[in-house]
Image (tube, grey):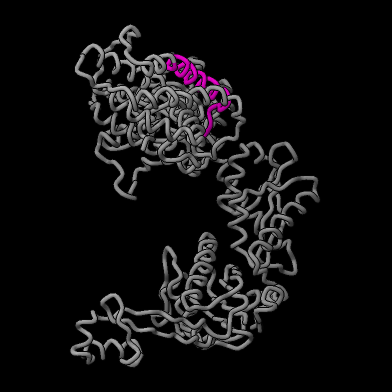
Amino acid sequence: MNLLFEIGTEELPAGYVPRALADLRRLAAERIESARLSFEKVETYATPRRLALIVRSLPEKSARLEEDRRGPPAQAAFKDGQPTSAALGFARKAGVEVGELEVRDGYVWARVVHEGEPTARLLPELLAGLVRDLPAPKKMIWGEGDGPFVRPVRWLVALLDGEVLPVEVFNVSAGNTSRGHRFLAPGELRVSAADYRDQLYTAHVVADVAQRRERIALEAATLALSESLEAVIPEDLLEEVTHLVEWPVAIMGCFSPKYLELPDEVLATVMIQHQRFFPVRKPGERLANRFIGISGHQPPDLNVVRAGYEQVLEGRIYDAYFFWTEDLKTPLAEHHKKLAGINFQRGLGTMADKVERVGTAAIELSDRLPLDKNVLREAAALFKADLPTQMVYEFPELEGVMARAYAEKQGIDSRVASALEDAVKPTGPGAPLPASAEGALLAALDRADTLVGFFHLGKKPSGSADPYGLRRAAAGLVRILGQMGWEIPLQDVLEAVAAAYRSRGLEISPETVEAARTFAEERLESLLTEAGLPTLAVRAAMGAPSVYGKMLRARLIYELMQRPEFAELTRLYKRAANLASQSERATEPNPALFATSEEARLYEALSPTARATSELLERGASLLPPWDPAAPLPKADLTSLEAPLTQILALADALDPFMDNVLVMVEDEEVRENRLALLRRVRNALALLGRLEMLGA
């Protein structure tokens, strides 16, 4: 038996549909299984006006179920061999005779049998519950108190092998008729589970989401190719447009060539973000003065639609062009002065104060990093200069892009212009990171300044609440430092902005800097574990000072963890490290004081182990160059690490007999301290890798 269930609605929000489909599939599968009904698969379909599912191969009735149900204690159920009211009540509730009760383990048990129920009887309430319980960020109530649902429900289809099921929800009763395209086939349409997709297609509705997405991409690409151009099809725009139309029709329009003076990013933003149009470009070149809109309707004259598209786009591009020309009348340095009129945060000053702090910290750290100090100084002097411009005020997503565009137009060094664009990256969790070192430093310190400042004000995130975006700032900070591969400690980056705050009269405590560092490291831990590294390996590597150092060590520890011998080494290492902590004297072991062969053997193994650890880190850094910690782990051929890995693991062969046969805490102080010094050498030999004692059992 096949089930077809369709919820017909007013136009659904495009961003909601993918989530709704996933929730509908999940809830349907869970509840059908809970009703003891088997099925082959659940198919889902959606357009802006409907959510639908087809469940294939349902049985005629639910599965028979037998279960043992425990009742009251036997001594309370029976007195002198006769059933008490407790036994009688339990038997009645379980639907069995008292004589059928069994006594086991001191309790009364009943074998309860649930006979299968007809599927047609189970489904109506189940399907009504799906509609009522389908999650949505916001739901509506309409009519005479109907709802709540994400949009008003206008029709329902509920068919089990062609028979209408008595489903009623929100004062709408299910039938066997759906609706075609609102304009191209406005009448009712009889449908069935067997031919649902094809039946809707004849009514100008592409119900299959994947088919509709593919059709949009193909039509856009083909239309562009007809003029020797190529369509720019961002994945997120394609997804959104897919859920905006039922019958996609691609239409190419054009705009005045004079607007090509605008940067491509401005044109693309206007087309994509504000009109949901696909930009068009010459292959390998800049955008052309063309665009492709996807209509959900195919009127007799497409030129009418094209003219409408061109008219609305003209208005938006004209605004952008006006902002562009007006902004260019003022040098970028003059725009930069207007930052004094934009508040950053009460207690932390204006945006001018912020960029000044970032610039001060950047110059302080620049001697320690491989970058051009002259480029850095110029970029710092213009950092965020596009923020007060009319273009960025209207299109905030173009911050940084416009700084670069205005700088290039005004003859500023292209390296400085690129740094200004990089300085606002990343703009989101998966957004690209800065490419230039100068821009990366400004971007990192911008986020560090935000963290330290807000932590100083006591505005740390609590639970899931993060109104100031501090988790995003911390993630951006560690992503930048990780990809750049700088060996500068995270603590020093945060301390540089704290010093800049202090130089301007705001006393940032060491505790605030430490709290910000811990918070940023927690974000790094989350990113690395999400990338696939084990939590223990990541935490063991957190002792390294730099972000890339932590990342590299976590990856190398993970490589060691793949080997069975490493578990034994970490167990022994933990014991050795714990004993070594009994004394921290700065003394080296003296071989003349060795009283056992185990001491001498361990001593001989330490230098090769220390060299192997250094070699592992050196080779690892060359094989695993810096990467974005938010990205999947980079693939690398690590076979050349075999020798140092084997040498490190061999330490267990010398450490095991020492830990088993040598008493460290002897009464003789000189011998005791010598053996503790030996264990400190063990700890120090592997300490470069991280806190391996965290891995021991």
Query: Is residue 12 positioned above or below 475 on the image?
Result: below
Residue 222 location (% of width, % of height): 77, 53
Name the foreground residue: 54 vs 237. 54
| Residue located 31% across and 22% down the image | 662
Residue 382 location (% of width, % of height): 46, 25
Query: Is residue 81 positioned above or below 140 on the image?
Result: below
Is 622 magenta? The answer is yes
Provide the major secondary structure of the magenta segment: helix
Q: Quadrant of residue 523?
A: top left
Residue 30 location (% of width, % of height): 48, 70
Q: Quadrant of residue 108?
A: bottom left
Residue 103 location (% of width, % of height): 30, 82
- Residue 102 seen in the figure: yes
| Residue located 55% across and 76% down the image | 38
Q: Magenta segment, which residues?
A: 605-628
Name the foreground residue: 651 vs 438. 651
